[in-house]
Amino acid sequence: LAKTTQPISMDSYEGQEVNITCSHNNIATNDYITWYQQFPSQGPRFIIQGYKTKVTNEVASLFIPADRKSSTLSLPRVSLSDTAVYYCLVGEGLTGGGNKLTFGTGTQLKVEL
Amino acid sequence: DVKVTQSSRYLVKRTGEKVFLECVQDMDHENMFWYRQDPGLGLRLIYFSYDVKMKEKGDIPEGYSVSREKKERFSLILESASTNQTSMYLCGSKGAPDYEQYFGPGTRLTVT
């Protein structure tokens, strides 16, 4: 399983764009890159997933370079409610069934006024 | 609306007790997972199951066992609870080919 490395913490202010980068040097050909968000006292929640290039949804964008050894989660115009831990995961394969998910320690994002 | 429920939000047990943590999902998912979460260590996978009666060890299975007799239910068992098993326990489920894993609210277990 590909190991991921993310910053332990990041600080930002409301209205700013936040970019969290994750490195995954040993990513396999059929691995996807997935990001989850976790608020205190709750289970993690899926944000976005991608394989290569760029993916965008209503919450975030995910940028993946051609070598796929890293990825960047971009949160546009963050608010106080975006304060949470963000996890980068690599794995699951193309079929998505039965494979283990490995969560790292995540990035604690703190958004202030 | 998808749902993963866990039997208790908070649980206090004594050292040596047998502890059962129950997880139920209503999405007909094949895959179910048990994690523990500790400060500074993130989520660590204990066991997962990809079908009824099937299970595989995760990264930290020592001191735990699991049971999956029905597709919707996945139980985590602490045969003899110890204080180092005090933690937040999270259950997840995932179908195929859907890639998203859904999580329950967690059970905060304290072993005294």
Image: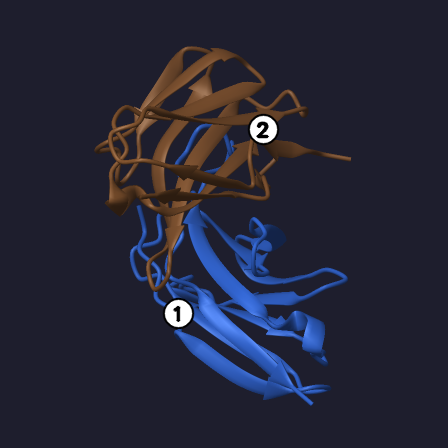
Chain colours: A blue, B brown
Residue B101: quadrant of the picture: top right
Q: Is residue B60 visible?
A: yes
| Label 1: how many Cα within 10 Å (few below 14, some 14–19, many 20+) | some
Q: Quadrant of the N terminus of chain B?
A: top right
Secondary structure beneath label 2:
loop
Q: Which disc number belongs to residue B80?
A: none
Q: Position of residue A101 (x, y in %)?
A: 42, 43
Q: Which residue is disc 2 drawn over?
A: B95
Number of marks in the image? Answer: 2
**Which amino acid is tagged 1?**
Gln
Asked which quadrant contains residue A35, the reply is bottom right
Which of the two residues, A51 or A111, is positioned nearer the viewer here?
A111
Identify the residue at image location x=44%, y=28%.
A98
Contact between marks 1 and 2 (CB within 8 A): the answer is no
Establish if B67 lies above or below A95: above
The Cα atoms of the two marked residues, 1 and 2, are separated by: 27 Å
Q: Which residue matches tag 1?
A: A6
Does dot 1 land on a helix, a strand or a loop? loop
Q: Position of residue A74 (x, y in %)?
A: 61, 73
